Image (tube, rainbow, N blue to C red):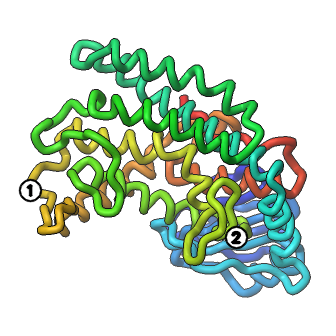
Amino acid sequence: MKHLLNTLYILSEDIYLSLDGENIVANRDKQIAARYPLHTLQNIVSFSYAGASPALLGACAERRIGFAFFTPRGKFLARSCGSGNGNVLLRRAQYRAADDPDQSCRISRTMIFGKLYNARWSIERTRRDHKLHINEERLAASSQKIRELLPKVKEAASLESLRGLEGTGANSYFDVFDEMILGDKKTFCFRTRSRRPPLDAVNALLSFSYSLLAHDCASALEGVGLDSYVGFLHRDRPGRTSLALDLMEELRPSMADRFVLTLINNRILKSSDFLNTESGAVLLTDDGRKLFLKHWQEKKKETLTHPYLGEKLSWGMIPHVQALLLARYLRGDLDAYPPFLWK
């Protein structure tokens, strides 16, 4: 259980929530594990299959406390709220911001700043940890290029100029991505980013990790009451969770790219885990996908200190916290949206 920003997160799969007077009670094996006063909460997010009592759901609805249910792996299931409380005001604020070019640019700037900041930090970590096995000069040059872009991103006046800066930074980052691969270069050689379809093993891993991260971000956004389909940098497109793609931008280098590098450099995956199709696409085999997912779930359980909140939490909680911070900004509770800056 974790209490952040007046939100209670139930992270254990076997916790059943019930009501006792003015308190929410967390029960495990019919024994009380914890107790929280309802008046201190604005939201409850449960990753437990055990569920919650109808009395508690009714009390939360009456007090306008949002209640979101997820599977233990983070798939959004449902959100409960009272008849007079929905998410209409938050979503109307989101839609107004999405329709305002200046507001959209303001939010997008912070997300792209976070993306480039984290990309540069990923390069710097490789320089620090593997100095004897890399072309340090190339990595240092790429890091410096991205560093020079950061103040320009802060001053970007339009989404078009922001996309240009993001593209320049991404090119500098992926130009040296192969330098950060220290494993089997015959299997894991990266030349350029290829998406649909991925044309090599590294791109297959990146694409799969981005799909999982986008899913986690969409679930987190739905959990706080935002519309995951209406974004700021990524504009509306039928069937696309544009806001989830916005949110994941700052998380790609730290959550997805570093995870892929760990799988490769620690030799967790090998050439037999990939399938080369007649069309030229390279895909994970069923066994490779299972191994990937196993380690992805383990990664989400690892802990770190959130750079903005100063709280220790798991990697799997990061999209949920960032979604909550974005919702607070749109409600006017924060002066600016604080991106996730990996340290």
| Point 79% across, 79% down: residue | 81
Element type at mark 1: helix
How far across and down, in percent of the image, does residue 23 sit? 80, 68
Compare residues 285 and 11 and report the one nearer the observer.
Answer: 285
Note whether residue 300 is visible: yes
N-terminal of the pair, mark 2 or mark 1, is: 2
Note whether residue 1 is visible: no
Q: Quadrant of residue 17?
A: bottom right
From this view, report whether residue 302 is shown above or below residue 219. Answer: above
Query: In the visual, does 301 lie left or right of 237?
Result: left
| Point 70% across, 52% down: residue | 3
Q: Quadrant of residue 266?
A: top left
Q: Which residue is mark 2?
A: 227
How far across and down, in percent of the image, does residue 236 sit? 65, 68
* Image marks 2 and 1: residues in contact by CB distance under 8 Å: no
Q: Which residue is mark 1?
A: 272
For badge 1, the amino acid type reads: Ser
How far across and down, in percent of the image, does residue 315 sit? 50, 47
Q: Which mark is residue 10?
A: none
How many residues crowd mark 2 within 10 Å: few (<14), some (14–19), many (20+)?
A: many
Compare residues 282 and 183 and report the one nearer the observer.
Answer: 282
How many residues crowd mark 1 within 10 Å: few (<14), some (14–19), many (20+)?
A: few
Total labels drawn: 2
- Rendered-image quadrant of the C terminus: top right
From this view, report whether residue 256 is shown above or below residue 237. Answer: above
Query: In the visual, does 118 lie left or right of 324?
Result: left
For badge 2, the amino acid type reads: Asp
How far across and down, in percent of the image, does residue 183 sit? 17, 35
Element type at mark 2: loop
Q: Quadrant of residue 137?
A: top left
From this view, report whether residue 341 is shown above or below residue 136. Answer: below
